[in-house]
Image (cartoon, rainbow, N blue to C red):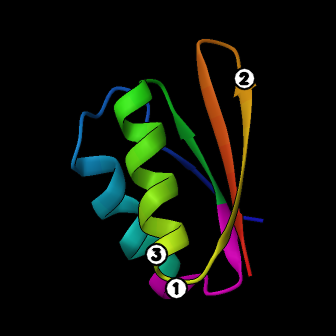
Amino acid sequence: MIVLDTSGYSCPEPVIMTKKALRDNKEGLCVIVDNRAAKENVARYAAAVGYNVETEAEGNGWKLTISK
């Protein structure tokens, strides 16, 4: 599974990066985020377009596994 590291970016950039990555990886991907707003917004976007989202704390941030 593709890993997209959005650490260091503030919203809406992680959502935009996730949207672009999902165009090429329709089955899903893992997104690394380092702030709560990005975690919530990326998860909300992925759910809104029909993906399942699993969130897990990782280091100083979170790993969101986005899958069909």
Q: From what the image shows, is residue 26 above or below residue 53?
A: below
Q: Amino acid at mark 1?
A: Asp
Q: Secondary structure at mark 3?
A: helix
Q: Which residue is mark 1?
A: 24
Instruction: Give 28 or 44, whichever is nearer the viewer.
Output: 44
Which mark sits nearer the N-terminus, 2 or 1? 1
Give residue 19's position: percent from left, percent from top. Answer: 38, 72
Please tell me the numbered disc located at residue 58.
Answer: 2
- The Cα atoms of the two marked residues, 3 and 1, are separated by 18 Å
- Using residue 6 as the reference point, say whether residue 29 is left or right of it: right
Q: From what the image shows, is residue 3 above or below residue 39?
A: below
Q: Amino acid at mark 2?
A: Glu
Magenta extent: 23-29
Instruction: Give 45 or 26, whichever is nearer the viewer.
Output: 45
Give residue 55's position: percent from left, percent from top. Answer: 70, 42
- Using residue 31 as the reference point, say whether residue 37 is left or right of it: left
> On the image, which quarter does residue 37 sit in?
top left
Q: Which residue is mark 3?
A: 48
**Residue at image x 54%, y 70%?**
47
